[in-house]
Structures are given as structure tokens and as C-alpha cells.
Amino acid sequence: MAVMPSEAHAAIRVDRRRPGLALLIALLAAVPYVIGLVLPYYANDVHLRPADQSIYAYDLGTMWPYDTALGGVVAFVTVVGVPTAPFVSGGVAMWSSFMVWAWWRTLTVREVVLYAAAAAVGIASIAWLATPLANELLMWFWD
């Protein structure tokens, strides 16, 4: 009887758990809010306006960073990112929660912390939309 070598090759192990990727995507989902809405609001001192003056008295298109060479890129990122960011953030929060729930026995503490941070950032970016500041900035941007 001859012993033949196995035809099976060593399987390549691919780790499907990527908590750093989840956190990165959650942070990137918040970028349109920060770059397109919050940064112009504070950098141009719109937050210091008198209480009786409306935010609509300020033209967002003539303010920094929209009046720079990268203004078109900032406007594009904001126009595309603001409507899609809540869905991406919600997906990251659900994905992170599911990964902790499904793999809780094999995850390291570092992975659990990264998944928890990704879920927290995702939930926080959605919850921020319910604040009065977010409503004011979104209406100002879409005006």
C-alpha cells in the first residue's frame, strides 16, 4: 500500500473581524458633517451672531472652506455625504454590535473596545442629527 501526499493545500486563513475598519468607517461617516457644516459655522464666527439675526443672513457659499480652491470638493463631499452618512453610521453600529455578539468568546479586549467605539461613533453621529444645532446647520446648508 502506497501512501500518497494529500492533494489538499493548506487553507489560507482570512480574519473576517476588522474592528479598526469599523471605527474608520464610522469616523469617515462623520466627516461631511464636520467639514461641510460645523467647520464653516465656527471658523467664520457665525456662532457669534446676535440672537435676533437669522443664520440665513450668511451665505454659506461665500464662506471658508467653500470659497477656497477645494470648495468644490468640500461641497461635493457634503452634498453626497450628508444624506448617506446616517445609513453608513447605522450600518457600522449594527455591524459592530453583531460582531461583538457573534464572536464574543473569541474577541480580545482591544477588539471589543474598537467595536464599541465604532458603534458609539455611529450612534452619536445619528443622534447628533436630532439636535437643534444640526437642524439649523442642515437647513442653512440646503437653503
Image: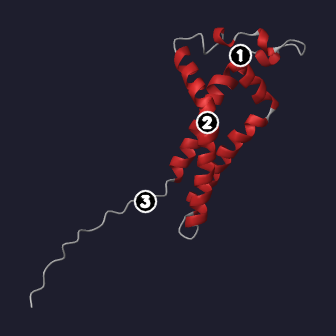
Say which quarter of the image contains residue 25: top right
**Sooner in the amino-acid sequence: mark 1 or mark 3:** 3
Mark 3, other Cα within 10 Å: few <14 / some 14–19 / many ≥20: few
Q: Residue at x 78, y 24 (%)?
A: 136
* x and y percentages locating residue 19 in the rendered image: 53, 53
Residue type for callout 1: Asp
Front position in the image: 139 or 100: 139
Query: Which residue is under mark 1?
Result: 143
Query: Which residue is under mark 3?
Result: 15
Residue type for callout 2: Ala
Residue 85 tag number: 2
* x and y percentages locating residue 61 in the rendered image: 64, 11
Camera-side mark, 1 or 3 = 1
Q: Secondary structure at mark 3?
A: loop
Residue furthest right in the image: 52
Q: Residue at x 56, y 59 (%)?
A: 99
**Sooner in the amino-acid sequence: mark 1 or mark 2:** 2
Q: Residue at x 52, y 49 (%)?
A: 20
* x and y percentages locating residue 60 in the rendered image: 68, 13
The colouring scheme, among rainbow, by chain, secondary structure or one colour, is secondary structure
Q: With respect to residue 38, does 54 lie above or below?
A: above
